[in-house]
Image: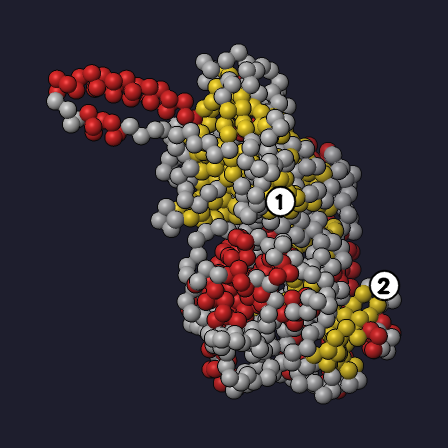
């Protein structure tokens, strides 16, 4: 390692001599110190002809960063990279040969006389090169305290004149002092690409890039699919990032001129270590190092909620996190596909209720506190005021909205949109104003002479529709009363409109080939599940309530009420129900990969489930529970979370199903419910199984059990350690305590697993299965723990540590349900 030698022992030895005999030695010592200081000055750099071999490093002058060879995660490949020097947990911020690793420790990084950095392998073949466009006379490669690795002329400290610098070629980390964007003069596009995995720094699927088509904005993509958009810069912040505000920790700014377009930030407090990292899962997270912990913590992610997902509400829709449903149409717009919109599939977006009349005169409606729409199809002018902007938009029949470009002071500049307005969301503060074009009749004005007639016609049509609607409700109510009175229920809220389509029995019989055994997907305590194909070609799964079902009408109605009001990518989607004659059925989307238990317990018969898919399933389940506990309108406790109730779509994404036992969050059960503990033994929390008390922490316990089952491939129920009579929970806790957690991992994933992710999953799971509810984290913390590298607290001995002598049978059935 290239490092500063220790010479203090020589100085101490000198002090043991008489003064007259110490002078020559003192002179020698000072000369030695001078030489060392000269050498230490060069410890942050190499000159032409010098090398860095594997095992040597250089350190920036302030000791912040170190450059050398490393192996990421569990990989044995060798890379040249830069990492934080002062933090105990290594965080790599730049990799030179991320696409061409070395397979041994024979690599050499050298600086040629022309100023080219070259990485050579054992046979002196070039693995990576800085590929500079101009040569140098006396080049030096220096690691700066900002983490920028710079090749410059020895006597030229101007970074703008550097021959080459790593900041122009970022990987997945955005650091203070970097330029995130485009340099037109130098032909540079500085953007960030995720690693493939924690073991592989080669470019992954996700990129975070400044898009300069239209008015510039930052866009996060999964390959070519947009995931998140910052919105345009408005003089104070990016329109879609309202939390950006002046603070004592860092400053930030946006530069936009003929030569450059880039975003940048600088740390104001030198004691703070902070950066933005584009993680392998596509989440851009702002990490800050905390010495007290010590560890990296997530300061803020780029995507905080569903409304940050690009075009979550489709064209001309607006996302509101504090409303239910989250998506609504812009005023004077209506859903393009009313059926899908009612199901919570808002991707079809909204269309105008009244077409524009460019020649007859249009007007504008003002929306406040919003994230401005996608600006890739926009036009802008920096010198116009808002009145000139409105006139310009009116003159162009394709213009659909306008806004100020800069909101500082009284506002200035003009930004115009053309076509549909995509990716709008509502903020409570720090949003912007936008003016959306409407037909004049929609805003109470215009030259049309038959507006009054239109209004009268609308009133008549509305009245007729209301009458028809009420008659329809009366008919439906009479039919339900006749077919079993399933709407009769003492639960509060059951009288609400379910907003769930009704399927005709004949259509379901035809779709399932009269409930043929060949179409049967599975069976549970409620009855059977059948595959079906509707006349329009849509594949469905039909959950048919058995007349002898232990899950009766109350549970059936419970599932209808809850799942009809829940819409999330990690929850199974219900399409409707059928209640005719003596039949009661729920119709779901078809998930062809069945349920999770088919993959983790019966791997000899099924398709192997590698670790990346298992970890993605764990995260999907966590996000689904987070929605149920915190973000959904009703705040639901599932009460029967288990592998059989986790269904997998075509891409193996997890979807939580079976809400027959779910309850609205509100603390402990009522007296009547506490007498009937329902669910599945092995997943129940101690306080629920013993006392009947349930809360969101009951689901957290079940989640922890499920994670341990996913990692180990073993069921908690029925597991019994042959020597110590431990449950799966007790066995996992003992292995973690003794640092033998690898013994828990199922052999089928040994070749694909990421040790750091597996260890973190086991650790988080054991925190979830603590005996006392107050010791368990909430799902919001669990999602954060799974996605970060922060230090976790040590779990105590879990609940149900030992195996019970005898186990009661499940009250909800144990066979898998395939939907």
Lower sequence index among marks 2 and 1: 1
Name the side, left or right, on which 99 lies relative to 246.
right
Q: Which mark is residue 746?
A: none
Residue at 63%, 54% (x, y): give it: 751
Location of residue 29 by image quarter: top left
Residue 304 coordinates in the image, percent (x, y): 54, 51
Q: Which class describes the residues within 10 Å of circle 1: few (<14), some (14-19), or many (20+)?
A: some
Mark 2, secondary structure of its residue: loop
Residue 71 coordinates in the image, percent (x, y): 54, 41
Residue 408 coordinates in the image, percent (x, y): 50, 34
Name the side, left or right, on which 92 lies relative to 600.
left
Whether 458 is drawn above or below 553: the answer is: above
Q: Which class describes the residues within 10 Å of circle 2: few (<14), some (14-19), or many (20+)?
A: few
Using the image as rendered, state which of residue 13 and residue 802 is in the foreground: 13
Using the image as rendered, state which of residue 482 and residue 200 is in the foreground: 200
Residue at 63%, 80% (x, y): give it: 812
Residue 90 coordinates in the image, percent (x, y): 46, 43
Using the image as rendered, state which of residue 748 and residue 170 is in the foreground: 748
| Residue 516 shows in the view | yes
Location of residue 575 by image quarter: bottom right
Residue at 43%, 32% (x, y): give it: 1
Whether 773 is drawn above or below 355: the answer is: below
Residue that badge 1 annotates: 196
| Residue 159 shows in the view | no
Residue that badge 2 annotates: 537
Q: Label 2 to label 1, Cα distance in Å? A: 37 Å
In this picture the colour scheme is: secondary structure
Whether 545 is drawn above or below 37: the answer is: below
> For the residues carrying marks 2 and 1, which lies nearer the camera in this image?
1
């Amino acid at each position: 390692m290239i490092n500063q030698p220790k010479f203090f022992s020589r100085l101490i030895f000198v002090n043991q001599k008489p003064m007259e005999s110490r002078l020559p030695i003192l002179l020698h010592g000072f000369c030695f110190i001078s030489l060392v200081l000269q050498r230490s000055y060069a410890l942050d750099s190499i000159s032409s002809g010098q090398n860095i071999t594997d095992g040597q490093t250089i350190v920036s002058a302030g000791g912040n960063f170190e450059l050398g060879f490393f192996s990421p995660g569990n990989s044995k490949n060798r890379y040249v990279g830069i990492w934080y020097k002062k933090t105990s947990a290594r965080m790599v911020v730049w990799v030179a040969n991320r696409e061409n690793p070395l397979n041994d420790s024979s690599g050499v990084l050298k600086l040629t006389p022309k100023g080219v950095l070259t990485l050579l392998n054992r046979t002196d073949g070039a693995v990576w090169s800085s590929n500079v466009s101009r040569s140098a006379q006396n080049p030096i490669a220096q690691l700066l305290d900002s983490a920028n690795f710079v090749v410059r002329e020895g006597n030229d400290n101007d970074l703008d004149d550097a021959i080459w610098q790593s900041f122009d070629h970022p990987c997945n980390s955005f650091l203070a002092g970097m330029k995130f964007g485009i340099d037109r003069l130098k032909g540079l596009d500085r953007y960030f690409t995720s690693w493939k995995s924690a073991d592989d720094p080669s470019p992954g699927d996700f990129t975070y890039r400044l898009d300069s088509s239209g008015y510039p904005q930052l866009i996060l993509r999964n390959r070519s699919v947009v995931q998140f958009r910052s919105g345009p810069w408005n003089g104070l912040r990016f329109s879609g990032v309202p939390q950006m505000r002046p603070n004592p920790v860092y400053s930030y700014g946006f530069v936009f001129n003929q030569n450059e377009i880039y975003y940048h930030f600088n740390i104001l407090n030198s004691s703070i270590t902070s950066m933005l990292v584009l993680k392998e899962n596509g989440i851009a997270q702002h990490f800050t190092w905390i010495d007290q912990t010590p560890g990296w913590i997530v300061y803020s992610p780029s995507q905080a909620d569903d409304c940050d997902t690009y075009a979550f509400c489709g064209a001309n829709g607006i996302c509101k996190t504090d409303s239910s449903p989250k998506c609504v149409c812009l005023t004077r717009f209506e859903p393009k596909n009313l059926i899908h919109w009612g199901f919570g599939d808002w991707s079809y977006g909204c269309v105008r209720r009244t077409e524009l009349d460019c020649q007859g005169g249009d007007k504008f409606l003002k929306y406040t506190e919003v994230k401005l729409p996608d600006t890739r199809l926009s036009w802008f002018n920096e010198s116009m005021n808002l009145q000139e902007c409105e006139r310009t938009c009116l003159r162009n029949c394709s213009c659909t909205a306008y806004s100020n470009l800069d909101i500082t002071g009284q506002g200035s500049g003009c930004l115009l949109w053309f076509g549909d307005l995509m990716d709008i969301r509502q903020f409570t503060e720090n949003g912007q104003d936008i003016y959306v074009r409407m037909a004049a009749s929609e805003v109470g004005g215009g030259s049309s002479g038959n507006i009054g007639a239109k209004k009268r016609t609308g009133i008549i049509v509305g009245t007729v529709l209301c009458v028809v609607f009420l008659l329809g409700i009366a008919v439906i109510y009479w039919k339900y009363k006749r077919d079993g009175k399933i709407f009769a229920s003492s639960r509060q809220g059951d009288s609400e409109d379910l907003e769930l389509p009704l399927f005709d029995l004949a259509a379901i019989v035809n779709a399932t080939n009269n409930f043929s055994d060949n179409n049967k997907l599975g069976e549970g305590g409620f009855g059977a599940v059948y595959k079906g194909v509707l006349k329009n070609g849509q594949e469905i799964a039909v959950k048919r309530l058995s007349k002898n079902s232990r899950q009766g009408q109350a549970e059936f109605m419970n599932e209808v009420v809850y799942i009809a009001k829940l819409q999330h990518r990690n929850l199974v989607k219900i399409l409707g129900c059928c209640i005719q004659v003596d039949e009661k059925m729920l119709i779901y989307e078809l998930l062809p990969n069945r349920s999770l238990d088919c993959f983790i317990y019966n791997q000899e018969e099924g398709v192997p489930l590698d670790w990346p898919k298992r970890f993605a399933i764990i995260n999907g389940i966590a996000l689904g529970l987070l929605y149920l506990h915190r973000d959904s309108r009703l705040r639901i406790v599932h009460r029967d979370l288990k592998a059989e109730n986790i269904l997998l779509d075509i891409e193996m994404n997890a979807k939580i199903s079976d809400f027959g036992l779910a309850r609205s969050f509100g603390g402990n059960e009522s007296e009547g419910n506490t007498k009937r503990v329902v669910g599945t033994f092995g997943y129940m929390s101690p306080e629920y199984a013993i006392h009947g008390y349930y809360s969101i922490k009951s689901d957290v316990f079940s989640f922890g059990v499920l994670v341990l089952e996913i990692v180990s491939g073993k069921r908690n129920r029925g597991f019994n350690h042959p020597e110590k009579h431990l449950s799966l929970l007790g066995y996992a806790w003992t292995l973690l305590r003794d640092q033998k957690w690898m013994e828990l991992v199922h052999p089928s994933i040994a070749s694909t697993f990421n040790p750091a992710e597996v260890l973190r999953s086991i650790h988080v799971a054991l925190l979830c299965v603590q005996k006392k509810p107050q010791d368990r984290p909430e799902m919001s913390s669990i999602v954060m723990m799974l996605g970060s590298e922060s230090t976790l607290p040590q779990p105590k001995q879990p609940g149900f540590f030992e195996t019970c002598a005898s186990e009661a049978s499940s009250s909800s059935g144990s066979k898998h349900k395939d939907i």
